[in-house]
Image (cartoon, rainbow, N blue to C red):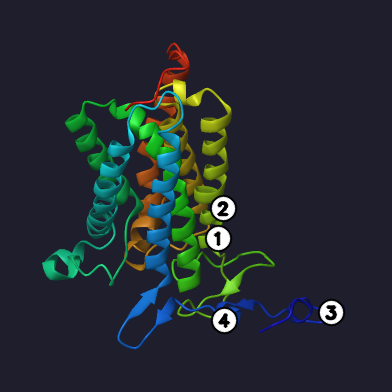
Amino acid sequence: MLSLAAAVAAPGSAIVQPLRWEELGLSPIALDLGFFTLKWYSLAYLAGILIGYWHLSKMVKAPGSPMAQRHADDLFFYATLGIILGGRLGYTIFYAPELWSSPADVLKLWEGGMSFHGGLAGVLVAIAWVAWRNQLSFLRVCDYIAVCVPFGMLFGRLANFVNGELWGRVAESRVAWAMVFPGAGDLPRHPSQLYEAALEGLALIVALLWLFWRSDARWRPGLLVGTFAFGIGLARFAVEFFREPDAQLQEFALRTGLSMGQWLTIPLMVVGLYLLIVALLRPRLGSGAPAAT
């Protein structure tokens, strides 16, 4: 593995060796028992869902919750289905429609990818179902779920980096942390997976946790989910300038001027901004209301 000293050119040196992903010693496989293989990507999904459920359980115990623990348990189950099924269907619709020629391939979750927008749609369907069945406020339940989603985004993007996939564009100017990824040629690229982890994950976690626990956001229906929708849409739109478009969609990006991911984030940002404005204009709900039982 190159040391930092070797990566920096000495005075008079003509060539600076770029970082290489292989030299980081990373592997997509977390555990290999021969008869059973566990990948970091699977663990990332599991960690995001479990931590989200744990935090949602803490939130529903705080004053003013629109739901009880039993509703959080139902959401945990149905939202997990929504993430998996919606994420896979979204991927095949927006990014790999050729998979529909062989429907069995659509179900092969271990081959191909998952779509954030499809997973988001699946979660919204799950929330709508639980809210309708239990006569809960759909918007306020979305507020609570929105606070928990960035945990999964953080772990998922870190797993993408560990897998050496979804790399960024070639770094046009000298970027110290640009690196050569396997299967992406010999030119150093932006590690856009880490950009996404920082913006879509860590930054939103900090912002939403502060809004929920340190402000009156939970008393303003739509404020938390609006912040999430606008924030993640803006983060994704910005990072797409550094992320290499999917191979099958590079021509689409050249033709339209924006990647598929950017086009899909525009309505997300519009909806988020609308929810933010409406939430701030509406009267604040009365504080101190007891949690649901």
- Element at label 2: helix
Task: Tell whether 1 sits left or right of 51.
Answer: right
Tag 2 residue: 198
Residue 88: percent from left, percent from top: 25, 59
Tag 4 residue: 25
Cβ atoms under marks 1 and 2 closer than 8 Å? yes
Sequence-wise first label, 4 or 2: 4
Q: What amino acid is labelled 1 in the image?
A: Leu
Check disc 3: other Cα within 10 Å, few if <14, some if 14-19, many if 20+: few
Q: What amino acid is labelled 2 in the image?
A: Ala
- Element at label 3: loop
Tag 3 residue: 10
Tag 1 residue: 194
Residue 123: percent from left, percent from top: 29, 44
- Element at label 4: loop
Q: Quadrant of the C terminus?
A: top left
